[in-house]
Amino acid sequence: MTRSDSLDALDFTDTTDFEDADRGLVAPPATSTVTAADGRVVWDFGATDFLDGDCPDTANRSLWRQSRLCARAGLFEVTDAVYQIRGFDLSNMTLIEGATGVIVVDPLVSAECAAAGLALYRSQRGERPVTGVIFTHSHIDHFGGILGVTEPGSDVPVVAPAEFMEHSVAENVYAGTAMLRRGIYHTGAELEPGPAGLIGVGLGFTASKGTPSLRPATVEVSRTGQEETLDGVLFRFQLTPDTEAPSEMNFHLPERRALCMAENATHTLHNILTLRGAVVRDARIWSRYLTEAIDVYAGESDVLFASHHWPTWGTERLTRFLSEQRDLYGYLHDQTLRLANQGHTGIEIAETIELPPALARAWHARGYYGSVSHNVKAIYQRYMGWYDGHPSSLWEHPPTASARRYVDCMGGPDAVLAKARQYMDEGDLRFAAQILKHAVFASPDSADAKELLAQTFERLGHGAECGTWRNNYLMGAQELRGGVSATPISAGSMAGALSVDQVFDSLAIRVNGPKAWDEDFTTLWHFTDLDRTYRVALHNGVLTHAVTDGRTTRPDLSLTLTKDRLMALLAGGRAEDIEHDGDLTVLHRLMDVLDPTDPAFAIVTP
């Protein structure tokens, strides 16, 4: 922890956030749980009841306070004809009433939770049809519940920022298995809710375990200042790429003097690089877009709301909030580069930087979701990459090989455990965790090493102010004690929204290169529903694809099909049922070199 993480300067008697979080409550949840069609509980409103108690020794007092605020659940009125569903998932769903229906903004992670939120809204405001949907950005907790508020094939307009589909698919499909797996640690999804386990993730309690889905946008926002009218409501958009998401936008409702900041300004220091993995974000441009929002929209707004947390009311207050958020990202960016240019590495800078006192005291600038430490390292990574400049870092052994050598140098497994206990007793949990990692990787069957590392992770987690740090530590302890748990959510339910190009891209990522080295064939795929033909070739272990007229290609196999038939084939359908000409064994050879994905790989054990 850096000195900026000290709780001494925080005013725990300040109740402003609690008053704002409770303001405008229209109705609490109508049920105690949200369930899937098969009866599984995908969201439990009672899971946060324990947060009504005093902060225990197993939680950071500041994170406990934040978690209590995030646990508020129900339908809330933000301003005239603008409502929010909060506490139904990791994110908020905003509902903006139009002339004939309601526009849904960011329909949560899963269809089940979005449908439950919409039902609560309708129980209070009438059976208004959904007349528009807005995705503020390309993260799953802001679009995954789309089929809970619209029907498949619906003609309801969907508005999203430029390149929304490209980035949504890159994150949730191309790298989806790894990100979702790490996301379980990030959100603490498999932790038991309670004072010693899951208390929140800083942005909300956790992510729901329902069914995510995806729909392409029908209206793309490509510039700041672009105006769109949905169901009689005027929206003015601010495009903010490479901020909290590579594809993101804020919007202003001039007729209601309300400003939506998407996830660019929330009640936490956010991530420059999220611990679940992502493209590194640009703290410099993030800060500049917040300046633009202040200059263009703040003075014309009476309320600011976002896709997480609670609103801020009053022009002066929301302007100050945005200014402090702006300064937060700008300060971390500029000071990281100042020190990098003096020769310091990312790890060294992360131990050095302190926030200015005014920011360190601001509740909304605390590191509940991001942290000063890992954000500084991310800024360094964006500019300098993984290499710290020291030649010894160029060609290090991988973790298991390094661990065996470290343990040998330290005198063997027993000596490592003895030293780890000494460091734990002295309160140096950070170094105890470092050397115990080597002990576990060098001797993965050692129950003593795994238990001691689990205890170390537990103590680190219970002291962490950052919710994602706590969850990663406690999930790590759980893996050490109980083995690898399954990933309870899959992105497979979004596959139908992918373009054919994106489907072939996702197959290329699964090709086992060495297994496919000697394969060399070309196929033509004619999609009758798209009136488009693709040339797909496997050569040198690389699967390539391109649209072609087919006249200059001599394929080994030609296929005539629809996109739906392609998806059925990839789901296990019979190749023989597809109209074809040529050697059908080519298709089987392609399938044979595709690696299965592993959604339950180990993280803290070899």
Image: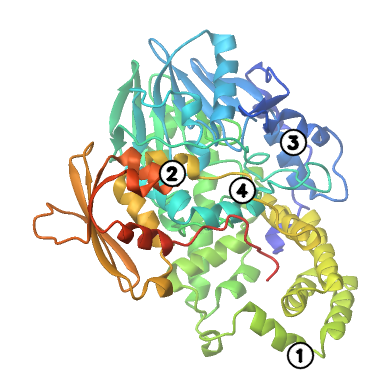
> Relative to 91, does residue 523 appear above or below in the rendering?
below
Residue 485: percent from the left, percent from the top? 70, 53
Mark 2: which amino acid? Ser
Q: Which residue is mark 4?
A: 365
Mark 1: which amino acid? Asp
Question: Which comes before the other along the chain, label 1 or label 4?
Answer: 4
Question: Which comes before the other along the chain, label 3 or label 1?
Answer: 3
Q: Which residue is mark 2?
A: 138
Q: Nearer the viewer, mark 3 or mark 1?
A: 1
Of residues 564 and 289, the one drawn nearer to the viewer in this rendering: 564
Tell me, what colour scheme is on the image? rainbow
Q: Which residue is mark 1?
A: 408
Q: Which residue is mark 3?
A: 68
Toward which corner of the image does residue 434 lie, by quadrant? bottom right
| Inter-mark Cα distance, 4 to 2 | 23 Å
Question: Which comes before the other along the chain, label 4 or label 2?
Answer: 2
| Inter-mark Cα distance, 1 to 4 | 44 Å
Residue 174: percent from the left, percent from the top? 43, 55
| Inter-mark Cα distance, 3 to 1 | 47 Å
Residue 79: percent from the left, percent from the top? 52, 19
Q: Is residue 88 left or right of residue 595?
A: right
Q: Quadrant of the N terminus?
A: bottom right
Of residues 356 and 71, the one drawn nearer to the viewer in this rendering: 71
Q: Quadrant of the C terminus?
A: bottom right
| Inter-mark Cα distance, 2 to 3 | 27 Å
Mark 3: which amino acid? Arg
Q: Are marks 2 and 1 in contact (CB under 8 Å)?
A: no
